[in-house]
Amino acid sequence: MRQIILHGGVGSSPDFSDLLEKYANMAINYEDPLDAVVAAVKYMEDDTNFNAGTGSVMRLDGSIQMDAAVMVDGNFGAVINIEKVKNPVQVAREVMERSPHVILSGDGAVQFARKMGHPVYDPSTERARERLKEARRVALGDPRFLYKGENVDTVGAVANFDGKIAAALSTGGSSPMMRGRVGDTPIPGSGIFVRDGFGIAATGVGEEIIRKTLSFHMFMHRHNLEEEWDKVAKNSPFSLGAVGFDNDRYFVLSNRQMAFAFAKR
């Protein structure tokens, strides 16, 4: 049996769930779960409704730096603060499969992407430029800003094809943010984790997810997942969410509204 679940970022409108369902039903046609989750995330990276790839939010200096990661049981690949590429999640997969490393960042990630054939691409949009004005206003008013409001950040996918699990994440970050900021997406055990029939793709305030090593924490409490989620997230001032699989059972966890979709065949 093939199963896949997608999320559009915690804080994303449930109105986008139909769109995610379309992407899930397209991605499930792939034969391998890693192919499926990478395809699903690429669909979202190419859709300006989501904060990943084209449609990513801008840093306070007006730049766009993106993070992405892929994970299967026993292997991992990620890019950190990559710029001027269309599909960071594809580069993350290539880091895992076609480089001697598991994580590449900044200029090194960009140089690797060019070697892999990714052309120069500008992911900025007019919407991102408008959002930057508000981000700068917030940052000026609070130099220790942390994103306690409604977040719309990471997009993610987890697939379980006959017990073989893969996960993928991509994000433009959480606005407002300084240049060079790294969130939870490219950190295994924080935003993403796959092991022993369990796979999870998280979303929310990256700093809080990192502090809690949220994905690994939920793996360790997989046998009372919902109860543990309530302890961790129910009363948190930070936006937090996740989707994934515990063997054949899929789960959706969120303390804010969140668009998601599930498909199987």
Image (cartoon, grey):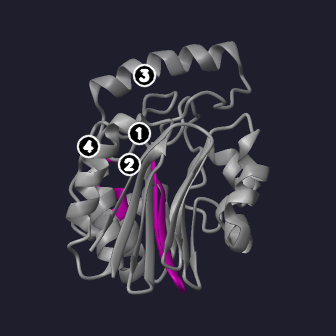
Q: Looking at the picture, does residue 160 appear above or below residue 211? A: below
For this view, does 44 lie left or right of residue 132?
left
Q: Looking at the picture, does residue 134 appear above or below residue 219? A: above
Depth check, mark 1 against mark 3: the one in front is 3
Depth check, mark 1 against mark 4: the one in front is 4
Residues rendered magenta in the picture? 66-89
Depth check, mark 3 against mark 2: the one in front is 3
Among numbered discs 4 and 2, the one appearing first in the sequence:
4
User: Crowding near pointer 4: few (<14 within 10 Å), some, many (20+)?
Assistant: some
Among numbered discs 4 and 3, the one appearing first in the sequence:
4
Q: Which residue is mark 2?
A: 83
* Amino acid found under the numbered disc labelled 1: Ile
Q: Which residue is mark 3?
A: 131
Which residue occupies the extreme right position in the image? 231
As drawn, the label of residue 95 is none
* Amino acid found under the numbered disc labelled 3: Arg
User: Crowding near pointer 1: few (<14 within 10 Å), some, many (20+)?
Assistant: many
Residue 74: tell me if it is visible.
Answer: yes
Q: Nearer the viewer, residue 191 or 95?
A: 191
Q: How many marks can you see?
A: 4
As drawn, the label of residue 47 is 4
Q: Which residue is mark 1?
A: 64
What whole-number distance in Å separates the C-alpha atoms at marks 4 and 3? 17 Å
Q: Position of residue 130 (x, y in %)?
A: 38, 18
- Tag 2 secondary structure: loop
* Amino acid found under the numbered disc labelled 4: Asp
